[in-house]
Amino acid sequence: MAWQIEWFSNKAGTTIGTLAVGKANEGWNYAVLGRDKTGDFQVYKLGGDLFSLDDARAEFLLEMAAAEKSEQKVRRWRAA
């Protein structure tokens, strides 16, 4: 069981994610989700077993930025 501690979203709401902590020995985890072509959220990246909240947040925010950049490339390709 994990408890979600923080939630994040980009301004457009196309990329969302959460930081969570498990039991005492399980460490910190995160999930990054992005919208698919139908508008439903799909898992982009899962990360886990990180030592601290700060470590988890740093890795998580990098993955959020990568997911958003990936989505922008998809939008540009569709528009062409």
Image (cartoon, rainbow, N blue to C red):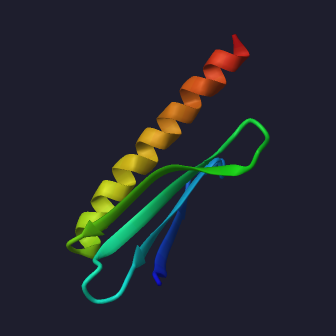
In this picture, is 55 found above or below 77? below
Q: Is residue 12 left or right of residue 45?
A: right
| Foreground pick, 24 / 73 | 24
In this picture, is 52 found above or below 31? below
Q: Position of residue 46 (x, y in %)?
A: 43, 56
In this picture, is 24 found above or below 64? below
Q: Position of residue 71 (x, y in %)?
A: 57, 34
Residue in the image at 49% along x and 42% along y: 67
Residue in the image at 42% along x and 64% along y: 30
- How many marks the image carries: the answer is 0
Q: Quadrant of residue 48?
A: bottom left
Q: Is residue 39 left or right of residue 62?
A: right
Q: Position of residue 4 (x, y in %)?
A: 49, 79
| Foreground pick, 77 / 26 | 26
Residue in the image at 35% along x and 48% along y: 62
- The quadrant in which the C terminus is found is top right
In this picture, is 63 found above or below 9? above
